[in-house]
Every structure is written in structure tokens, then in C-alpha cells.
Amino acid sequence: MDIFGLLTMLGGLALFLYGMNTMGDGLAKMAGSRLEQILEKLTSTPIRAVLLGAGVTAVIQSSSATTVMVVGFVNSGIMKLSQAVGIIMGANVGTTITSWILSLSGVQGDSFFIRLLKPSSFSPVLALIGVIFLLFLKDEKKKDIGTILLGFAVLMFGMETMSGAVEPLADVPEFTNLFVAFKNPFLGMLVGALLTAVIQSSSASVGILQAMCATGAVSFGAAIPIIMGQNIGTCVTAMISSIGASKNAKRTALVHLYFNVIGTAIFMVVFYTLNAFLHFSFLNQAANGAGIALVHSAFNIAATLILLPFSKVLERLAVLTIPDHGGETEEAEQKKRLADAGMKLLDERFLEHPSFAVAQAKAAANEMAKLVNEALTLAMELNEGYDKKKIKQICDLEERVDAYEDGLGTYLVQLCAKPLTEHDNHVLTTLLKSISDLERMADHAVNLAENAQRRHREDARFSKKATAELAVFTQALRDIIQVTFHAFENADVEEASHVEPLEEVIDDLKEEIRSRHIKRLAKGKCTIELGFALTDLVTNYERIADHCSNIAVAVIQVDEKEHDVHKYLGQIKTEDPKFAQLYHSYKERYALE
């Protein structure tokens, strides 16, 4: 092979790896959060977990991606270590489908249908369709399909280019002798493990091996140990991912490693023991793409069938390798860590799967909203009766909400740099606009708690009329909070449209209550100190309603792709008949006596 042949081979390798990465990204993006969410829900039995792991990996075309995702689940407390074992086994089986797709490049025959099966025949068509989808269609799902088709075409073209470039090496004695050396099982395993560890993809390294088969110099005797090593090398990605994670997350990565090492050891011992007596003749035959795919699948399926009944043993082995210390269990340690962090749903490992990361961020924001709602409910209850325990609860909730805002803010900024679908962009935009409002609402809950604390300390009590007015105001605030949070959680534009009319009524209530208070003050029926307390209370109420309005507007604006807040609010107040109708309805409902 001359320098130009080497450049062609390297170019083919580059296209192959790029195509595999592009196709995998497209598949993962199109799958969105749906398939990945199933991982955390439908793992009740080991067999279902295996099938689930295999299915998801077959779709997103990467066992490493599935395993890293599972490490993230375990690290964030969403999934138990026992559930993760079966998924990891299934991921090893699911990844073998890639090698079968790549084996199509070796299809031979003069029949029209046989020739049609060759990637060199249908890849250009897929590439053309993919380009049309990407350049001329606006629908995000169709663009994702275009990315998948184009990635697959580039992948197969790179495979064909590699195979064509290495074919002349069949006549180079040094190259053929190199693969004779790989017949040493341990050397072959080492080479396979190192190659896979470097490119961090067993599917890609198996594809490279399949391309090398075009030379005819790769025998099954040389290929089998390399394939075994590739299964071990793919564990590197999960091991790296577990650095800095919880003990159970590290154990999850170790389960992946132990599964492949033990499975490989069993296979090698049994296979070469039988070979010593039976002398398998096929070991000296030249390997082909389909043969490589068959060996790859047979090993992973057999290893899963053998080790699945011993999944508890693998789990125990990982626990023995990373034991609990100081009498504190992993569960207790993780609970403490999550409490300190303020969030359990976000993990940086999920950022490699943006659609799922967005779903996790949305779930975390919903949890944040629940904490805010709880704090506000407790704060409003203080008007009915002072309770020192509730004051402490509100302060604790506010600290947790602050932790959510910090964690979510950082996570969402990181997500902004990822490729997202139009729907995910909508969700991300809503969250970015809303989390600061949620945090400020928790601050106002603390303000209300401090207000109640001062009144209790000074033994100051509102008059019966002021108390009755505040009861109406409080009910209006409870209702706007409930409507806002429900609209936010469900991205319900219709329900969000009810918030702004109610917010206008709350503004009116604030002014009317202050006006009535001034009249009472003038008649000497109220003290200046209580007046300050009342003004502070209703001001906090009104500002909480303002933040509800901001959140509702964020939900509506993102759906309608409107970005000018003042313009939008001005339009609905002056031009939308529904707004006037709702406003008058709420005005009657919350009328002061």
C-alpha cells in the first residue's frame, strides 16, 4: 500500500466513525426521552430489564451510551443497582445489531435484488433523501430522519472505502503475518480491548475488523480473540463516566466490566478447551463480515444467558469491590448527598442525551414548583394562626428552592449548547424564563413568614374587617398559584390564559385593601404599626401574583413564539375578549364586602 492508499484508508475510517456518530445522534434525538424514560420504569424483572436494554441499545446504536445513561440513573437515585444489571446485559446484546447492518457490505451476487442489498447500491439513494430532508423540510422529526439516513450513508460509504483501501494489503506478507500473530488469544484480546478503549465504541471497532476482512488475511482464529477483547474495551466509557459518582454508580460500571470479563473468560476457556480436542477447522478460514457479526452476537447472547441467573452474584461482587465504610450504607450516603445537592434528577451524564436531559430538567422544575407551592401554602396559613414550626419549614423549603435554582440554571445553560428538537427548545425556554420567578416566590414566602413573626412578637392583630378582606385576598392568591403551577407542569396554554385576568383582579384587591386601611387609619380604628404590616403583606401577595403572571406568560409565549412581554400583555388586555370576560368573572368572585 502506497501513501495514497493509506490516505484513502484513513479517510474511509474517518467517514465511518463520523457516520456512526451522526447516525447514533440522529437516532437518539428522534427517540427523544420516550425510550430512555422506559429504562427507569420497566425494569421490575431481570428478563424485562435485559429485553429493555437490548431494545434501547438497538435503537440508539450504542451500548456505551446506554450504560453511561444507566450509571447516571443509579448515581441520581432514579434506579437501583439491581435494576441496572439486567439493562447492562441487554445493552451488550443490542449493540450487536450494528455489526449485522455493516455485514451487508459483503453481500455477493449478480441478482438484481442481491445487488440492491449492497450498501453501495442503496446508500447513495439514502444520502440523497437525507440531504433533501435536511435542506428543504422544516419539520424537526423529518430533519432527524434526514440526519439518520445521511449518517447511515456516510457510515456505509466509509466502510466501503476502508474495505477497498485495505484489499491490496492481501499481497503484503508483513500485513498477513501480523494477523497470524493475533491468533495468540491473549494478544488478540489485548489488541481488541485497546482499539475499542481508544475509540470508545465496540460497534465501531467491530466494523473496522469487518473492513479488514476484505483483505482475506483475517482468519476466524485471529478475529475471535479480537472480538472478545472489544467487549472488554467498551467498558472504558462507563468506567470513565463513573468517576466522581456515588458508590452505586461506580458499582454499576464495575458490573459492566465484570460481566464482559467473566463472560470472555468463560467463552475463551470453554472454546479453546473444546478446540484442543475437536480442532475446529473453521479457525483457519478467512473471516467475513457476516461471520464477524455472528461471533459477536453469539458471544453476547451466550454470556447473557449464562450470567443472567447470577446477576445477584455480579451485584455482590461489585459491592465487595467497593464496600460501604464507617457503618453508613450506600443508600444513607446517597440520601445525604442528594439532600445537600438539592436535586436528584439532574446528572451531567444525561447531557449526552439532550432530549432525556430536558425531560429530567422539566421534572426537576416541577419538583421545585411543588416546594414553592408548599412554602407559600404554609406562609398563607400563618394568617390563620402563628406556628413556629411552620416558620422553620418555610425557611428550609426556601433553601432547597435556592439549591434547585442554582442546579437547574447551570444544567439548562449546558443544555443550550446541545442539539435539541423544536419541542425540547420550547421546554428549555419556558424553564429558563420560569425558574427565577419560582425562586423569588419562595423568597416572598419567607417575607410573609417574617411578617407573621413580627406580628406575633408584638402581639399585633388585624381587625375583623381587615382579617375578612385578607381572607378573600388569600383565596385569590391560592387560586392563581394553583392555576399557574398546573399550567406550568402540564404546559397547558389554555389554563395559563386564566392567570393574567386573575392577576389584574389581585392588583385591584391590593389597591382596594390599602384604600380601606387608610380610611380605618383616619378613623383611628387601626394603628400605624399594623398598617405597615398589612401593607407589607398585601405587597408580597401582589408580587407573588406578578411572578405567577410571568410564568404563565412564559408558557403562552413559547407556544405562540412571541417574545415581547409588554407587547403581548398589552394586546391581550385590549384586544382579547376572553380576557375581559375572565377578568369580570374573577372580579365578582373575589369582591370585598
Image (cartoon, rainbow, N blue to C red):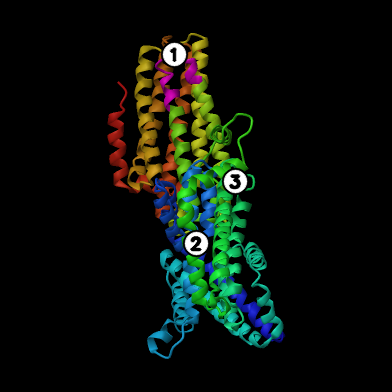
Which range is magenta? 377-391
Check whether the beta carbons of the residues at disc 2 and disc 3 lie within 8 A of each other. Answer: no
Residue 250 bears which disc, if any? 3
Q: Is residue 415 visible?
A: no
Disc 1 residue crowd, few under 14, some 14–19, many 20+, Cα 10 Å:
some
Quarter of the picture holding the C terminus: top left
Check whether the beta carbons of the residues at disc 2 and disc 1 lie within 8 A of each other. Answer: no
Quarter of the picture holding the N terminus: bottom right
Secondary element type, mark 2? helix
Q: Which of marks 1 and 3 is nearer the N terminus?
A: 3
Q: Does the magenta stretch include residue 537?
A: no
> Which residue carries the number 2 mark?
300
Badge 1 amino acid: Leu
Badge 3 amino acid: Lys
Q: Position of residue 350 (x, y in %)?
A: 53, 51
Q: Which of marks 2 and 1 is nearer the N terminus?
A: 2
> Which residue carries the number 1 mark?
521
Q: Position of residue 27 (x, y in %)?
A: 46, 64
